[in-house]
Every structure is written in structure tokens, then in C-alpha cells.
Image (cartoon, helix red, strand yellow):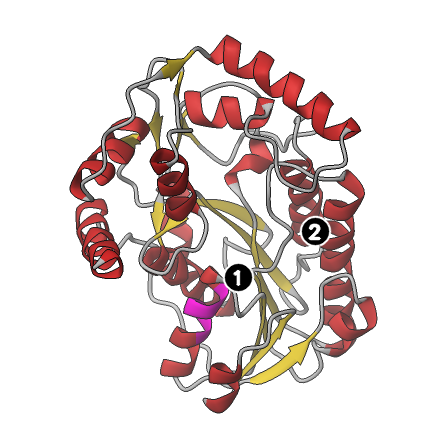
Amino acid sequence: MNHARPTSPVLVTGGAGFLGRRLVERLLAGGRSVTVLGRTPAPDLEARGVRFIRASLDDAPAVTAACAGIDTIFHTAAKVGVWGRYADFFRTNVLGTRALLEGARRHGVTRLVHTSTPSVVYNGQSLAGADESLPLTTACPSPYPLTKAIAEREVLAANTCDHTGLQTVALRPHLIWGVGDPHLVPRVLARARAGRLRIVGDGKNVVDMVHIDNAVDAHLCAERALASANSPAAGRAYFITNGEPVVLWDWINDLLRALGEPPVTKKISLGAATALGAVCETLWRVLPVQTEPPMTRFIAAELAKDHWFNLTAARRDLGYEPRVSMAEGTAELIASLRRGAA
């Protein structure tokens, strides 16, 4: 799809994070004027001309003011995790998004690309080839999907139907990974090396992932789509993946073997993991601990069930096409991890 290429000023929330930083780097490479709103200072980005506003999403006045003079907002910031107080997730993910929408309306922002998550359609079941017709979750044992579902609904509802005001789109990238990933792969490796990783279920569940460069591509594709007159993307959500589902535990074990680590062979049934998760959740609510529990009901389901998605809509409406394959990205990641261990 041939979209116009926007050149206007952008705001990136969470611009110092994994996705946000890589997006900022791509925007700078394209000659864009970039403002970043985030909690973690990024002096290297400021040295490259980025305007940095140090604030959290729960600082509504700062969030609203940051929208002045901006044409496109990339909202990548969120409180993530599988455990915590609902109120904390709601304050950041819902109230923070509402402040951003208020700022967009007040300051005449024309485009908002919202980073959502596939877990907004969590229903406790395997998702095989799922598309965007699935309803948003209203019952999930984790506050993250619940609050992200509320935020996504409100972002899409803010889209102006006559295409003369704010245009919005939500992207649902699944399991973003790649070189520089501070979350997904490092946590898997740490647990495996500590002997604390178990295959949940039969180990045959199939999942989609998305390489960081493809995730960034999708965000830029979404902005270009919204810049087109009467874009079908306006007011819609899209799953974003590599389009190459893998058997999760085979992929993890292949990665471990390539790094000289023993593969994960010990298993726990989904029923046992779910029961363990319920016990852990109860204990973590009453005990004065700040860490995440080793298992939750949500983690058990995520590790044992299929989660792969249909890319037809993203390809059709956004012009999105995965550029870095699973094989290329995995080889690059392994090489980087080997260098880091040397």
C-alpha cells in the first residue's frame, strides 16, 4: 500500500524503553523532530537533538502539555507485568492514556499510534490463527491485560469518524524480542540457568513472536496509513507478529542449546501450574513481598496454550510485511548473546 510519508513532529511515550528507543532511532534517522516523554533520562538521545520530558504517565498535566506542537503520538509506554495492584496498572495504563488523549484533543494532534497487546483479547483459551474479531477481555487474572483493554477501547473510540480531527490506531505486537531485549529472552535464560524453568503443558503449543525491527516497522506503517485520506486503519486494532508461528518450547530449547546451555526437559501439567499459580497469588497478596510470584494463573495459560494470529488485516490496511525473519533474528540474537558472554 502506498502511503504518504509524514515528516511532522512526533512525541514518543516510553522512548527510553526497548521498543520506544528503537522507534526513536528510526525516526531520527528519517530526519524527524522527536520529543520523548519518559521516566528514565536518555542523555544519548538528547545529544542527538531529542527533546526529553522527564515525567511518568500518571503526571496528567505533564502528559497533556507534552502534546503541544505535536502531529503524531506514538504511545509505547505502559506499566507491564503479570502481577501487581490493579490500581497501579489502572493509574498508568488507563489514566495515563486518558491524559494523552486529552492532550491530543487540546493541542490538535492529528495521529495517535497506540501500542496495545494481544493479551487484550485473553479468554483463557488457545488462540490459533485468531483475528481482530475477538472481543476485548473483561475477565482476566492479571491486571495488565484488563487495563490495556480499557485503554485500547478508549483510544479507538477517540478516533474522529469524519477524518478531520484525531485519527487513532492500536497495534498488538506479540512477544517483542531481538538484540537489546531487556525482558523476554534475558528472563527466560536466567530462569533456565537457575534450573527454575519448566515446560508447562505438553510442550507443543505454538506461538507468534515479533522481531523488534518488525515491530518498529509496523508503528511507522501505521502512522503512514493514518496520514492517508480515509484510511481504513483509523479507529481499528491490528495484531502484529513475524507471521511465522513457532513451537514455543522448541524455540527456547534451540536457543539454549546454541548458547551451550542444557535444554529444558522437566514438565508440569497446565492443571498443576494453574493450581500453583493460584496458591502463589494468594500468598503474594498476604505476604510483604515486592517481587513477582514464580507462577500465576495467567503465566500458566500463556506458557501452555497456542497464541498465534492472522496478519491479513495488518498487511491489507497498514502495508505491514515482516522484514526480519525468525531465522535471521534468532541467528543475530545468538551471535549477540555469545559476544556478551565472551
**Is 333 part of what is drawn in magenta?**
no
Depth check: 185 or 106 in front? 185
Q: Chief secondary structure of the magenta span?
A: helix
Residue 309 visible at all: no
Say left or right for 94 vs 280: right
Q: Is residue 294 above or below residue 55?
A: above
Residue range of the region highlighted in magenta in the rendering: 20-24
Q: Crowding at label 2, few (<14), some or many (≥20) Cα neighbours within 10 Å? A: many
Q: Is residue 45 above or below residue 99?
A: below
Q: Which mark is residue 38?
A: none
Depth check: 306 or 265 in front? 265
Say left or right for 205 vs 82: left
Provide the residue designation for mark 2.
93
User: The residue tagged with tag 2: helix, strand or loop?
Assistant: helix
Provide the residue designation for mark 1.
230
Q: In 3D space, how far apart are the residues under numbered discs 1 and 2 (Cα atoms)?
A: 29 Å
Q: Is residue 112 above or below residue 211?
A: below
* Residue 63 place in picture, x, y as percent: 74, 70
Q: Crowding at label 1, few (<14), some or many (≥20) Cα neighbours within 10 Å? A: some
Tag 2: amino acid: Asn
Say left or right for 174 vs 265: right
Tag 1: amino acid: Asn
Q: Nearer the viewer, mark 1 or mark 2?
A: 2
* Residue 124 place in picture, x, y as percent: 56, 20
The quadrant in which residue 278 appears is: top right
* Residue 69 place in picture, x, y as percent: 67, 85
The N terminus sits in image quarter: bottom left
Sooner in the amino-acid sequence: mark 1 or mark 2: 2
Say left or right for 93 vs 339: right
The C terminus sits in image quarter: bottom left
Residue at the (45%, 89%) spot, across then down: 48
